[in-house]
Amino acid sequence: MGRPSFLRSFSRSQVSSAIATAVDFVLLFSMVEYLKVWYVIATAAGSMAGAITNFLLNRHWSFRALDMRWHRQAVRYAITSGLSLVLNAGLAYLFTDIVGIHYSISVVVASAAVGVLFNFPMHRHYVFR
């Protein structure tokens, strides 16, 4: 099996991202609403759980990148995810505390923007190349 086409990897990565986002948001909203954790900390925890889910799905399905050692990909993914986490939490803070949008909308908007404009290009051209 070769590397999937751009369209196939983009489509699959979006499905993988949706699944990872579900994991992320379930954890985020549960922590904020039930455990009363500050939304910025909960955003970071949700992003981390989503990142692990996304790494596994992308490696095995979206990009079929099994020919490279997983730990090399994991390091690259960790770097990308760390930057993504900062972008997600920073944008959530900006939209919520500076702009005044409710945190639930802020994290969805931040996640969508970071996912398409940052994560996919980094995954395709750096992590799972």
Image (spheres, grey):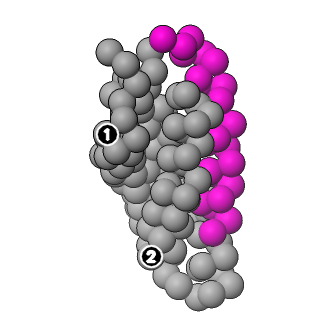
Q: Residue at x 32, y 15 (%)?
A: 1
Q: Helix, strand, or loop for circle 2?
A: helix
Number of numbered discs present?
A: 2
Please identify the quarter of the rendering in which residue 75 is found. Answer: top right
Camera sees residue 32: no
15 versus 60 height, above or below? below
Q: Which residue is under mark 1?
A: 8
Q: Which residue is under mark 2?
A: 105
Q: CA distance from mark 2 to mark 1?
A: 29 Å
Q: Residue at x 65, y 30 (%)?
A: 76
Task: Residue 85: say if magenta.
Answer: yes
Left or right of 120: which side holds 21? left
> Start and end of the magenta stretch?
67-91
Question: Which amino acid does the dot numbered 2 rest on?
Answer: Ile
Question: Which amino acid does the dot numbered 1 rest on?
Answer: Arg
Q: Residue at x 59, y 24 (%)?
A: 74
Q: Residue at x 44, y 15 (%)?
A: 66
Coordinates of residue 111 in the picture (x, y in percent): 49, 61
* Crowd tier of the residue under label 2, counting other residues whose Cα lies within 10 Å: few below 14, some 14–19, many 20 or above: few
